[in-house]
C-alpha cells in the first residue's frame, strides 16, 4: 500500500497499542474502521452507541485510498475540530502525523463530559425522588397549616 500523500510504501507500525500502516516519510497512518474503534476504546469505556456520529458529511479530495485507489473524502471527526480522510468504500481512514493522539484526547474529553452528565442526572433523579417522597410532601403541608 502507498501513502495517499507522498506515495511512499506504508510500513506496519504500532501506535498507541494499535497495529497500523504508517508512512515513514510524512508519519501519516492508515487505520481500518476496527483499528479506529480500538484506538478510541483505549480511553472511552461507554461503548460504540455513546460515541456519537463519526461522519456527517464529507468532501472529496485528490488523495487516493491505499487499498482501492478511490478518492478519499475529508470530514470533521465526530463534530470536533479534527479533520481526517476516509475511503467512501469503507476501507479505512487516513490520519496525518499524531492525529491518533488527538483522537485519544478528544475521546478522553468526550468520556469525561458523558460521565459528568450521568452523575448530574443521577443526582437530579435522587433529588426528585426525595421531593416526591411522602415525608417531604407531609412536611410541606405541615408548613402551610
Image (spheres, helix red, strand yellow):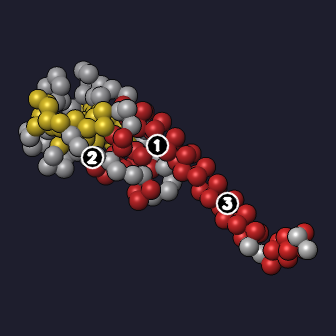
**Along the horizontal axis of the image, is 121 left or right of 93?**
right
How packed mark 2 is, by other alpha carbons closer than 10 Å (few <14, some 14-19, many 20 or more), is few
Q: Residue 68: x and y, percent? A: 9, 43
Q: Residue 27: x and y, percent? A: 30, 25
Answer yes or no: is residue 47 visible.
yes
Residue depicted at x 14% and y 31%: 61
Q: Residue 90: x and y, percent? A: 19, 50
Q: Which mark is residue 124?
A: 3
Residue under numbered circle 2: 56
Q: In the structure shown, which secondary structural element does the residue marked by tag 1 occupy? A: helix
Mark 3 vs mark 1: give the one in front. 3
Residue under numbered circle 1: 107
Residue depicted at x 56% and y 45%: 112
The residue lying furthest to the left in this view is 69
- Judge by depth and name the residue closer to the eye, 18 or 119: 119
Q: Estimate the spatial distance between the alpha carbons at disc 3 and disc 2, rounded to whole Å.
A: 32 Å
Answer yes or no: is residue 30 visible.
no
- Judge by depth and name the residue closer to the eye, 144 or 56: 144
Residue depicted at x 36% and y 43%: 78
Q: Estimate the spatial distance between the alpha carbons at disc 2 and disc 1, rounded to whole Å.
A: 18 Å
Q: In the structure shown, which secondary structural element does the residue marked by tag 2 occupy? A: loop
The number of discs equals: 3
Tag 1 or tag 3, which sits nearer the N-term?
1
Q: Which mark is residue 128?
A: none
Amino acid at each position: 500500500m502507498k501513502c495517499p500523500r507522498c506515495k511512499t510504501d506504508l510500513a506496519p507500525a504500532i501506535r498507541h497499542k494499535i497495529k497500523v500502516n504508517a508512512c515513514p516519510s510524512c508519519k501519516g497512518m492508515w487505520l481500518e474502521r476496527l483499528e479506529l474503534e480500538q484506538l478510541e476504546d483505549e480511553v472511552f469505556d461507554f461503548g460504540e452507541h455513546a460515541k456519537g456520529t463519526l461522519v456527517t458529511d464529507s468532501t472529496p479530495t485528490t488523495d487516493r485510498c491505499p487499498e482501492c485507489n478511490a478518492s478519499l473524502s475529508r470530514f470533521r471527526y465526530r463534530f470536533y475540530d479534527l479533520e481526517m480522510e476516509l475511503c467512501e468504500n469503507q476501507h479505512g481512514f487516513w490520519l496525518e502525523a499524531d492525529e491518533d493522539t488527538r483522537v485519544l484526547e478528544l475521546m478522553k474529553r468526550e468520556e469525561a463530559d458523558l460521565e459528568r452528565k450521568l452523575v448530574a442526572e443521577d443526582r437530579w433523579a435522587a433529588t426528585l425522588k426525595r421531593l416526591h417522597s411522602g415525608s417531604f410532601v407531609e412536611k410541606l403541608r405541615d408548613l402551610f397549616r
